[in-house]
Amino acid sequence: MKKILNNPADYVDEMLDGLVAAHPESYRRLGETGRVIARAGGPVQGKVGIVSGGGSGHLPTFTGYVGPGLLDACSIGNVFAGPSVGDCVDAMRAADGGAGVLRLYGNYGGDRMNFDMAGEMLEMEGMETTSVLVADDVASAGPEERAKRRGVAGLIYAYKIAGAMADRPGATLGEVTAAARKAVSATASIGVALTPCIVPESGRPTFSIADDEMEMGMGIHGEPGIWRGPLRRADEIAGEMLDRLLADTGIGRGERVSVLVNSLGATPHEELYILYRHLSRRLADAGVAVAVPLVGRYATSMEMAGASLTLLRLDEELEALLRAPASCPFWSM
Amino acid sequence: MNTTENGLTVAVLASALDRWADRMEAAADELNALDGRLGDGDLGATLAKCAQNIRAIRPGLDNSGAGDGGTGDGDLGQAFKACAMACSKASGSSFGTLLAVAFLTAAKATAGRTSLPCSELPQLLGDILGALSSRGGAALGDKTVLDPLDAVREALAALDAGERSDTAAQHGAATRATDRTIEIFRNKPNRIGRARMFAERSVGLDDPGMIAFRHMLESLRPVRP
């Protein structure tokens, strides 16, 4: 293992120390175990709170997206390991401005169990809560089993849309929840992996793959994908990812989408733009207009090489919410 | 569960939790080793952390109930909820969360009550099974803690009225049901969780969660006053 760290066991806590030290105007660290990142200014009274969370290793996801127009608080676990129920409870309390709290997170069994449990405990205390699971990875389950899909980079669209709705004056928990659901159902993603990453606590790669191979459809923790084979040219990779998403969603001529080309960590911006070049041409040929293209590191898997493509199918409401102001140290609109 | 003729009260629960916490700490290394053969190897550490957290809320249970001195006959629901919160703070194995789920289910079932008659235990265990299954996603037969829990529920429900108010008889029946379930499942594969990926290797190995359950049950052996 070749990583910049002090002690693997301190990896997450030292990362959070640094995150807060670098951005004190944005974040504060809370919770009994210090595994909650909340907005520096505290909850906004009268606004619906939005919490997310999951394992570390995906920055800027999850904690990075705490900020105005986005999330109110996040609970964070060890690398690729979910936060505890207690951390989720603390995050929900930190997000509570008295208008209810939405739990908005990726569809993984452990996270679901812990967030649901936290919600149940706080509901016993009278907090109003709802839950929306982000399930956008088309490689993890077919269209007939959408609810079983894993949550990947599409998370950030759900954060953005729900966050913008929560900022509208008088928005209710029901309205924010509905906006989040709408964003999730309009989002589809697929990833491609070239190399594994190493979880610092275990010191082992998440999977093995030959030097000249790629895997289409792999998840952000190395979950198996659709096929594995020789590394293809960028245009072919972009083309197959787009074809799969268009086939899954049925997006076609005359529609508008936002496009997210995301690095899984090691893949540089240069290669993301090489992918985007082909995607933008293909979408133009298909008569699909692109609004708000996003290219960069939004949801990573440590130092994994690879990329993911996400499409958000827009209508007027979603586009207005997507374009609403939002800011965090990693992304602003 | 150690119950008296009046059934389960906060005082009974508090003393049972002391013995439970002692046992979880004593069994931590054994459970870590068992878990390490198929999983993360953090089951014992997680339960030891739960025990530590339960000890931290223990003084509050002594002071529960009406009266300045604390009579120990306070709201069972509140006591169980405090246990759920304590276990929910232990990160690591999902078993900690499952314990919290079990305690929270008990909290809901006993909210506002100061005692739970022994005769209601099978019903409560049934509620807990349902909650664990829907939260954790496991089904009966998957070789998890649900299997001995269900066997105990069935064994308690089958006791006649006389035996049902006799805590020693209840504990004996529960112990036999648990031992039998562990025997039956030893040579079956795990069907859920990380161990599922090593399903073949799990044949012949006891499920660490079932062994943890047996430790818990042993620690709750009734103490005659």
Image: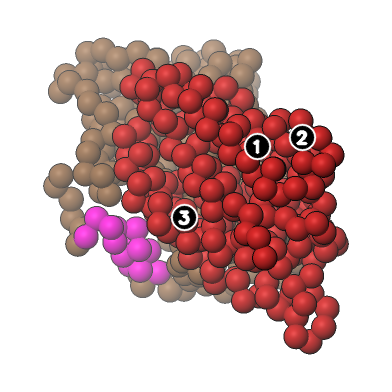
Q: Amino acid at mark 1?
A: Ala
**Mark 3 falls on what kind of element?**
helix
Residue linked to disc 2? B159
- Residue type beneath disc 3: Met
The numbered mark at residue B24 is 3
* Chain to which the residue tagged by mark 2 belongs: B
Between disc 1 and disc 3, the foreground one is 1
Mark 1 → mark 2, Cα distance in angstroms: 8 Å
Establish whether labels 3 and 2 are both on one chain. Answer: yes
Quickly name the residue at label 1: B173
Looking at the picture, the colour scheme in use is by chain
Q: Kindly identify the residue that appears in the image at 54 percent across and 57 percent down.
A: B20
- Whichever of labels 1 and 2 marks the residue nearer the N terminus, that label is 2
Which shade is chain B? red
Magenta segment boundaries in residue numbering: A7-20
Q: Which amino acid lies under the numbered mark 2 shown in the image of this protein?
A: Leu
**Residue in the image at 22% along x and 23% along y:** A209
- Colour of the chain lettered A: brown
User: CA–CA distance between discs 1 and 3?
Assistant: 22 Å
Name the side, left or right, on which A213 lies relative to A321.
left
Residue B51 as seen in the image, left or right of residue B155? left
Main secondary structure found in the magenta portion = helix
For the residue carrying disc 2, how many other residues have a C-alpha within 10 Å: few (<14), some (14-19), or many (20+)? some
Question: Whole-Å distance between the Cαs marked 3 and 2?
Answer: 29 Å
Residue A9 is a magenta residue: yes
Mark 3 or mark 2: whose residue is earlier in sequence: 3
